[in-house]
Amino acid sequence: MTMHVENASNTISESDYGTHTLVVYQDLETLREFYSYYVKKRVEEKNEVIQLAPFYETEDSVRKSLSKGQISIDIEKWEKDEKALIIIDSLKKYLGIELLESDYNSNKNLVEYAKAMGKSGVSILGDKGAFPYRHRMEDLVNYELSLPSKYDMDLKRVCLYHKKDFNRLSEDQKQKLVNHHLIAIKI
């Protein structure tokens, strides 16, 4: 389903914890607008911890996007003081030393960390561009399908795909991914 950026952000934001969502974005500008709306709402209004794993931009450019413009947040406050915003490169998160099998435990630990700080839960927004970059499309599909369609913890997972990366998948792979996620949106 195709949605305007703000509507997509609100749809995912208002979904229940446990939701595993697929978002295919047109370009970097659209992605920045999406995560700016989402992060602002979830940290300021919903008292949540956000982990944002970009691929097509640096961690510093994400900080700049979040702190400037119409939909901005106080990066210093949310990242350093409140420790409610974690920005980590997608290449490190998905293809670093940590084994993919440990993803569930990592998520569980992050939710426990959030709860210990008095937060309501966690949202993970991860760009999957690292997989196509490393020519690991089959690993990408296997990884996604190994994740639950619905989590049994106070976690929302938003899988971000640039449309060019998503279009590198076969029609069968695309359909498997769309079917595996509780919500699938194009922005």
Image (cartoon, rainbow, N blue to C red):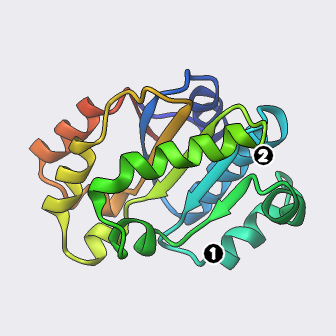
Tell me whether circle 1 and circle 2 mark residues in contact (CB < 8 Å). Answer: no
Label 1 to label 2: alpha-carbon separation? 17 Å
In the rendered view, tell whether residue 176 sits above or below residue 89: above
- For label 2, the SS is helix
What amino acid type should be assigned to the residue bearing mark 2? Lys
- For label 1, the SS is helix
Res 31 visible: yes
Residue lying at 24% horizontally and 40% vertically, measured from the top left: 177
Residue lying at 52% horizontally and 72% vertically, measured from the top left: 89
The quadrant the N terminus occupies is: top left
Whole-percent x and y of residue 65?
74, 66
Residue 164 placement: quadrant: bottom left
* Front in this rendered view, residue 71 or 136: 136
Local crowd size for mark 2, using a 10 Å CA cut-off: few (<14), some (14–19), many (≥20): some
Quick one: label 1 or label 2, which is nearer the N terminus? 2
Residue 122 placement: quadrant: top right
Q: Which label is found at residue 59? A: 1
Whole-percent x and y of residue 139?
17, 61
Whole-percent x and y of residue 133?
30, 76
Residue lying at 21% horizontally and 42% vertically, measured from the top left: 145
Q: Is residue 169 left or right of residue 97?
A: left
Q: Which label is found at residue 40? A: 2
In the rendered view, tell whether residue 38 sits above or below residue 45: below
What amino acid type should be assigned to the residue bearing mark 1? Glu
Local crowd size for mark 1, using a 10 Å CA cut-off: few (<14), some (14–19), many (≥20): some
